[in-house]
Image (cartoon, rainbow, N blue to C red):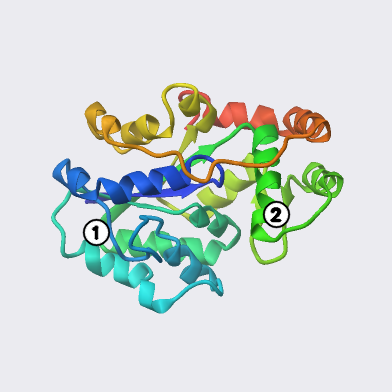
Amino acid sequence: MRTLFVHIGTHKTGTTSVQWYLNRHARKLKGYGTYVPKAGCPSPRSSGHHNIPWLLAGDPRAKIAHGGIDALLAELSEVDSPNAVVSSEEFHFLADRPQALAELDRRIFEAGWTPVYLLYLRAPGAYANSLYREFPLQNIHVRFADFLAGVLADGAYQPPGAVILRLDYDVLVAQWRAAAKGELRILDYEQAAGAGGIIPSFVRALGLPARAAQFRQRRINISSGETTDEMRAGAKLVDAQFRPAYERLVAPGAG
């Protein structure tokens, strides 16, 4: 069976930069045996396969014309590459939709591919602040104190809409593994960011030669906005509660 790598996020862990890299270098990567499908991408300028999880989750942003799991598997049936890769941070929200996640997992296996899910985790305090700074761009308006209280009480925050932003990674990982049979590989965003950036880490995760990490890269969707003293203090509280799980999950050999 061939391997389909499914890069599932999380948000604010360099996913947009990964998707730019995949789109820019799809032809070169195919030469290394890793195919980047077009199905599921809302834009030809990006290899973010967001439409696949959107359709599975019934998200109003989904458009049938952009393709879902059916279009993806039909496209993959026409290629002879031993590996393929799709990427969308929207995939990780399927952990809270176990039936949709199980369908994705089952369909990939039935098509003759082995799914390997790649999940990048970020230190939860920094992750919480990065998410919060992104909220105004998503038209989400909430006081930081209320956001923080929700995170500390529930290990998650649910903005308006159906998605849940989880900072208790034990819950996220347990839900994913309960619904999907494919291997879930957990990767450390903090380590990657401090050792040359996300692309070299991602290249290694795909089993590509190291020279593929030298292809042109771009940092995209960098967090903006001010980190206040209140946010710094809040990050310490979030880390005190949830960082032990993060460190355990990203530890070498944690599985």
The Cα atoms of the two marked residues, 1 and 2, are separated by: 42 Å
Vertical comparison of 165 with 101: above or below? above
Instruction: Identify the residue at the far front of this view.
Output: 225
Label 1: few (<14), some (14–19) or many (≥20) C-alpha neighbours in 10 Å = some
- Circle 1 — which element? loop
- Give the residue drawn at x 21%, y 44%: 29
- Nearer-the-camera pick, 105 or 12: 12
Residue 43 at x, y percent in the picture:
38, 64
Residue positioned 45% across, 54% down in the render: 88
Can residue 115 be seen? yes
Q: Is residue 129 left or right of residue 84?
A: right
At 30% from the left edge and 36% from the top edge, which residue is drawn? Answer: 216
Q: Which residue is mark 1?
A: 112
Q: Position of residue 134 (x, y in %)?
A: 65, 49
Q: Mark 2: which secondary structure?
A: helix
Q: Which residue is mark 2?
A: 136
- Judge whether residue 4 can be spotted in this image: no
Which amino acid type is shown beneath numbered disc 1?
Answer: Gly
The tag earlier along the polypeptide, 1 or 2, is 1
Q: Dot 2 surroundings within 10 Å: few (below 14), some, or many (20 or more)?
A: few
Q: What amino acid is found at the position of numbered circle 2 in the picture?
A: Pro
Residue 156 relative to residue 247: left or right? right
Is label 1 in contact with label 2 (beta carbons under 8 Å)? Answer: no
Which is more foreground, mark 1 or mark 2? Answer: 2
